[in-house]
Image (spheres, grey):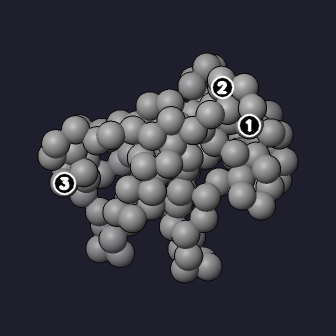
């Protein structure tokens, strides 16, 4: 294991977890960005528990709306994410995680980013 692929927990500052605004389903969108390149890798959903797990473990955890269960990115694929920074937007209704992406990439299709399709030619 190299220095880049080490999970580093993040201790939230006082009041920050309470500042997150969840939708009616108890979820908030979480954008995942490559810490080195700035490329947007994916968007997934978190509830309060997934956010707590992410910060406590230094790995990204999400809530699957279709399967109705938690999932840690890369546990089955090996394409793990190691959180380096965590932030929330001015309204508190969107999260941003800058990560070191291990493996092929973030997308379940095998692409580096889930945003590999363009509307342009």
Circle 2 is placed at which residue position? 4
Q: Are marks 1 and 2 in contact (CB under 8 Å)?
A: yes
Task: Determine whether label 2 and label 3 are within 8 Å by CB.
Answer: no
Alpha-carbon span between mark 1 and mark 2 = 9 Å
* Chain-order first, disc 2 or disc 3: 2
Q: Quadrant of the N terminus?
A: top right
* Residue 70: mark: none
- Above or below residue 68? Residue 105 is above
Numbered disc 1: secondary structure: loop
Q: Which residue is mark 1?
A: 102
In-image side of 3 versus 7 (left or right): right
Whether residue 67 is visible, yes or no, is: yes
Determine whether, in the image, residue 74 is placed left or right of residue 87. Answer: right
Name the mark on residue 18: 3
Vertical position of residue 8 compared to residue 38: above or below: below
* Front label number (2 vs 3): 2
Residue nearest the observer in this picture, 113 or 18: 18
Q: CA distance from mark 1 to mark 3?
A: 31 Å
Q: Which quadrant holds the C terminus?
A: top right
First along the sequence among labels 1 and 2: 2
Of residues 40 and 3, the one nearer the viewer is: 3
């Amino acid at each position: 294991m190299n220095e880049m692929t080490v999970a580093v927990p993040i201790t939230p500052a006082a009041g920050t977890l309470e500042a997150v605004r969840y939708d009616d389903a108890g979820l908030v969108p979480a954008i995942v960005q490559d810490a080195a390149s700035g490329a947007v890798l994916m968007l997934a959903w978190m509830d309060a528990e997934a956010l707590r797990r992410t910060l406590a473990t230094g790995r990204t955890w999400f809530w699957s709306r279709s399967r109705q269960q938690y999932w840690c990115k890369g546990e089955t694929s090996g394409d793990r994410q190691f959180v380096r920074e965590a932030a929330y937007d001015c309204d508190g209704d969107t999260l941003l995680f800058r990560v070191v992406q291990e493996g092929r990439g973030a997308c379940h299709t095998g692409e580096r980013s889930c945003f590999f399709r363009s509307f342009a030619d």
